[in-house]
Image: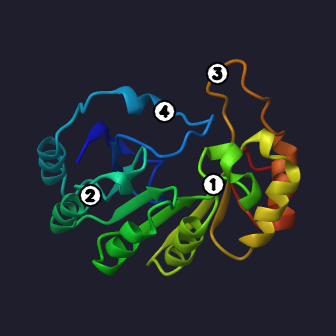
Amino acid sequence: MRIAAYNRCSLVDYEGRMAAVVFTRGCNMSCPYCHNRDLEGMEDSVSEEEVLGHLALRKGLLEGVVVSGGEPTLQEGLVPFLERVKALGYPVKLDTNGTRPDVLEGLLEKGLVDHVAMDIKTVPEGYGEVSGWPYGGAVEASVALVRKAPSYEFRTTAYPEMGVEALKTLCRSFRGEPYYLQQYRPVEAEGPTPFGEDLLRRLSREGGARLRGVEVG
């Protein structure tokens, strides 16, 4: 598996757990707000054996492993890697954009993933503009699969150019589920101005979404 970076300890990537984070290379989307886009041009900086060796040493201290990206489900070596992680006794969280439901289904059937966090980029009609990937059967199939996972969440980065009405629609669509609105952070100085936190708090109250990157008020 192609690993671009490895965070040996994180307190924010796997809720309620101290976890290691594996960042894979390569993504099939081109979201303008992505903070991990530099991973695409990086050489594989960490080997599987180095990661697994560290995880073996930290058994009893670390409480989980996050596999993020990039898009992990593009990696041909994902299944055998996760099999080895699970053999060490670690719960696994998978971050995904939902474009490979075939891979996701296999991971869930094999019991290789304990928590799935799926990004919902925007409403269906705006998917191509925001992510460079048209909304279609793959994303819909993945949403259905994620809902069958042992534990899951959906999340949307509140990118200003998608508009307020899109956020309202998404909040309604995922009401009653673990759905998060994440504050947009510009990657570059000329990026669009983020939505105001008061607006996001109001959407959260009215639509039932949870918030990340926004002060509770």
Residue at 72% x, 19% y: name it: 190
Q: Earlier in the sequence, mark 1 or mark 3?
A: 1
**Amino acid under disc 1:** Pro
Q: Earlier in the sequence, mark 2 or mark 1?
A: 2
Residue 9 is left or right of residue 12, and the answer is left
The disc at residue 134 is: 1
The residue carrying mark 2 is 78
Question: Which residue is nearer to you in this view: 183 or 1?
Answer: 1
SS type, badge 3? loop
Visible in this render: residue 185? Answer: yes
> Residue pushed farthest top?
189
Question: Which residue is nearer to you in this view: 113 or 107?
Answer: 107
Residue at 48% x, 58% y: name it: 15
The disc at residue 37 is: 4
The residue carrying mark 3 is 188
Residue 110: image quadrant is bottom left
